[in-house]
Image (cartoon, rainbow, N blue to C red):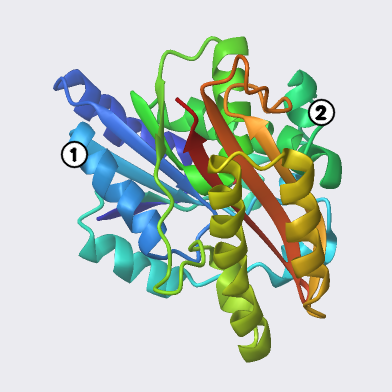
Amino acid sequence: MNILTQKAGLKQFLDKLRAEGKTIGFVPTMGALHAGHISLINIAQQQCDVVVCSIFVNPTQFNDKKDLERYPRTLEKDTELLVKANCDFLFYPEIEEMYPEEDKRTFDFGFLDKTLDGAFRPGHFNGVGQIVSKLFDAVEPDKAFFGEKDFQQVLVIKEMVSQLNYKLEIVSCPILREKDGLAMSSRNTLLNEAERTAASLIPILMNAAKEDFVSGASTENIKLKLTAKINAEPLFKLDYFEIRNTSDLNEFDASTDKEAVILIAVFCGRIRLIDNLVVKTI
Ligand code: PAF
């Protein structure tokens, strides 16, 4: 695997491969890689000739400084996992390489940036837009692969791709889960034992909510039931639990929407976890 820290060096390699007619798949990450990330690499390998993974903990998407400080950084282990997965390139830039000067761009993602994580983490999606566009400019991929755990992020990135007219395809890939159903996340490693035990309730409650939804319970009742259960666990603090449509995250409307997504963001101790379940309604 080639490891590069400079955009120019990466471009040289990738331009040569493009000239040979090779397609480039790109998996942007913030490191602390787990099986979920490796599944993105594997899907990218099935669909593209060459796969680039980036690791960059992007400061502009952290609205909480403490969250940025404690974000896990495990480069050595990440590199081993990528080598084992036969990833072709790791792009691992320093801050100055990605932000030689302050990025003052502000995106208008409309409602997508005003609801759910957009509302609870002000500026987060603008930061995601800034770094992902910079990474797309550096890699110029044919396809970029993102995990569906960050459901709202995938919609925001698709919107950015359309606004900035990037000629690439966004591929959204299924959530990978731990044995007990907890959605895989780099943040899971930050949970202590008690928090990790409590966190295993999240998929149980989400699946119960899904069952209630499928059996026709009202959104309001589902929310009341789940909120009561979350509040009963002293380690939890709920940011949001919502049932939305999958296209623009507006309230789910059974008369028009074919798919719903049940989304949750909850603090487990100091660690904020998110999860979602997509439900086909017809
Ligand atoms: O999902 C992530 O890990 C990050 O938000 C991303 C897309 C790599 C941008 O920093």
Which residue is located at x 84 percent, y 39 percent?
A: 119
Relative vertical location of residue 120 with respect to residue 79 in this rendering, above or below: above
Q: Which mark is residue 169?
A: none
Between 74 and 235, the one nearer to me in the picture = 235
Between 12 and 112, the one nearer to me in the picture = 112
Circle 2 residues within 10 Å: few <14, some 14–19, many ≥20: few
Residue 225 position, x and y percent, is 75, 58
Quadrant where the image shows the C terminus: top left
Q: Amino acid at mark 2?
A: Lys
Relative vertical location of residue 199 with respect to residue 151 in this rendering, above or below: below
Which residue is located at x 31 percent, y 67 percent?
A: 81
Q: How many angstroms separate mark 1 from mark 2 (CA)?
A: 37 Å
The kind of secondary structure element at disc 1 is: helix
Q: Which mark is residue 46?
A: 1
Q: Is residue 146 left or right of residue 98?
A: left
Q: Is residue 216 left or right of residue 180?
A: right
Of the image marks 1 and 2, the number of the one nearer the N terminus: 1
Quarter of the image where one finds residue 122: top right
Circle 1 residues within 10 Å: few <14, some 14–19, many ≥20: few
Residue 23 position, x and y percent, is 23, 26
Q: Is residue 62 visible?
A: no
Q: Which residue is mark 2?
A: 104
Q: Amino acid at mark 1?
A: Gln
